[in-house]
């Protein structure tokens, strides 16, 4: 990155060097710069308002209304109530061309905020039967405000757009409440891409990395997430005479060890990382009774779709064979949660230069966290990238989901510029 841009990133959150650089794109870049600069005060206000009034998944009523009213005011076609509280906007350009989808998530977390911000959340609610605080501890308030800003910029450019833009404001990325469905998967099941199928979908996520940087990588950038339950069946007997029964506790220990050898000994970990974690185990009632049954629960995470399928097959083999080797039996249930968040290699290579005109672009380190943007990227080519948004003071930098997590507002214009830039360049070049 050129030195003047580096200096600007450190000195001015609203510097025009954050904005879309001049290029050969059909839309005049200087005009786009001006539009982004003009919308930034609103983006900051929207972000602070949403931050102060957070809502949990499938309950984003106020946020959804705010988004819908804004899109309608821009003359964008709007559908509400998608997957409970989702909002979808369609902006049809004056010229024929491809379809680009842009996604922002709107939901907050059951976290009591401890940031000291003047617009910090004071909201509380009942979640899973407990009184909890509610806070945007993952930055979804920033994502929503950024996409609202992008919508305003692109609406101003409607007569110059070569194609159509779909704005997806999604509920329940962090997961639906117990007993409910939601998020990206439900939006797709309700026909999000049925009538208008995007040629590409883009999304971003704020991260506690330096402002002025964007991180992206081809293929797996965030892990799949699957839950599993194992029921190990033995034969109850006296703890002093284990040979008269079948010990499911001992078998469970062997199964746990066996599961760990799948990523470390049965898969080529130079191709893709994976992990199996047993986080809960229950069995027995007292020390001198070997029980009939032991139950375990855990998670599986992988960074490659093929590995995800393979690891499931190996788990079945390991669990059943170990149980049977000791005279017992076992039942394994795997529940898929999120697929791998997979960046289409061709799309990522095509659009990374566009991101580099907005910020310093680095190759992202794959993360074992999960994102339901992955469901969109299963349907159409997708690219998901990380937006650096760490506070200026190192002692104020905390990870996502921390009650002290803070988004540096200097990152907001970079986010608006990045999403605007990839949209305009994709529409113009495809």
Image: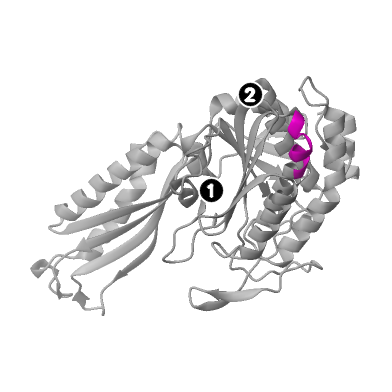
Report the side of 178 relative to 244 (left or right).
Answer: right
Tell me where residue 375 appears, x and y as whole percent.
48, 43
Q: How is the image coloured?
A: one colour
Tell me where residue 341 appears, x and y as whole percent.
51, 41
Report the side of 69 relative to 305 (left or right).
Answer: right
Prevailing secondary structure of the magenta residues: helix
| Residue position for label 2 | 350
Tell me where residue 29 appears, x and y as whole percent.
83, 28
Q: Quadrant of the N terminus?
A: top right
Q: Which residues are magenta?
A: 152-159
Quarter of the image for residue 44 reads bottom right
| Residue position for label 1 | 371
Q: Viewer-proximal residue, 288 or 282?
A: 282
The residue lying at 22 percent from left, 61 percent from top is 232
Q: Viewer-proximal residue, 68 or 168?
A: 68
**Magenta span includes 154:** yes
Q: Secondary structure at mark 2?
A: helix
The residue lying at 76 percent from left, 28 percent from top is 160
The residue lying at 75 percent from left, 68 percent from top is 120
Q: Residues within 10 Å of mark 2 (few under 14, many from 20)?
A: some
Quarter of the image for residue 343 reads top right
**Magenta span includes 91:** no
C-alpha span from label 1 to label 2: 23 Å
Report the side of 133 relative to 50 (left or right).
Answer: left
Q: Residue 179, which numbered label?
A: none
The extreme left residue here reads 244
Q: Quadrant of the C terminus?
A: top right
């Amino acid at each position: 990155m050129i030195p003047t841009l580096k200096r600007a990133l450190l000195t001015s959150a609203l510097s025009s060097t954050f904005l879309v650089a001049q290029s050969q794109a059909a839309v005049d870049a200087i005009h786009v710069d001006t539009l982004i600069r003009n919308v930034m005060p609103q983006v900051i206000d929207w972000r602070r308002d949403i931050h102060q009034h957070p809502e949990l998944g499938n309950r984003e009523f106020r946020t959804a209304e705010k988004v819908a009213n804004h899109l309608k005011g821009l003359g964008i076609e709007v559908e509400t109530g998608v997957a409970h509280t989702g909002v979808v906007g369609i902006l049809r350009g004056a010229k024929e061309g491809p379809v680009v989808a842009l996604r922002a998530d709107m939901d907050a977390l059951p976290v009591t905020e401890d940031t000291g911000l003047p617009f910090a959340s004071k909201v509380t609610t009942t979640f899973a039967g407990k009184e909890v605080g509610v806070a945007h501890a993952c930055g979804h308030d920033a994502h929503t405000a950024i996409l609202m800003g992008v919508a305003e910029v692109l609406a101003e450019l409607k007569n110059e757009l070569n194609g159509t833009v779909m704005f997806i404001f999604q509920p329940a990325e962090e997961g639906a409440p117990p007993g409910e469905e939601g998020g990206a998967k439900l939006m797709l099941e309700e026909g999000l891409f049925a009538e208008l199928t995007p040629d590409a979908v883009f999304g971003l996520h704020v991260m506690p990395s330096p402002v002025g940087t964007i991180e992206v990588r081809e293929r797996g950038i965030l892990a799949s997430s699957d839950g599993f339950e194992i029921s190990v069946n033995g034969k109850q007997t006296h703890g002093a005479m284990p040979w008269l029964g079948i010990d499911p506790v001992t078998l469970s220990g062997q199964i746990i060890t066996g599961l760990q050898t799948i990523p470390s000994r049965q898969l080529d970990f130079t191709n893709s990382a994976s992990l199996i974690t047993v986080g809960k185990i229950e069995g027995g009632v007292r020390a001198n009774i070997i029980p009939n049954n032991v139950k375990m629960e855990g998670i599986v995470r992988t960074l490659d779709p093929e590995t995800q399928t393979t690891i499931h097959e190996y788990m079945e083999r390991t669990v059943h064979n170990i149980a049977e080797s000791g005279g017992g039996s076992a039942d394994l249930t795997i529940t898929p949660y999120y697929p791998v968040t997979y960046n289409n290699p061709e799309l990522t290579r095509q659009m990374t230069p566009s991101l580099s005109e907005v910020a310093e672009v680095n190759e992202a380190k794959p993360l074992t966290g999960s994102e339901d943007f992955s469901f969109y990227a299963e349907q159409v080519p997708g690219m998901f990238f990380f937006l650096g948004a760490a506070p200026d003071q190192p002692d104020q930098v905390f990870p996502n989901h921390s009650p002290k997590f803070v988004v540096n507002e200097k990152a907001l214009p970079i986010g608006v510029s990045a999403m605007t830039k990839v949209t305009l360049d994709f529409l113009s070049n495809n």
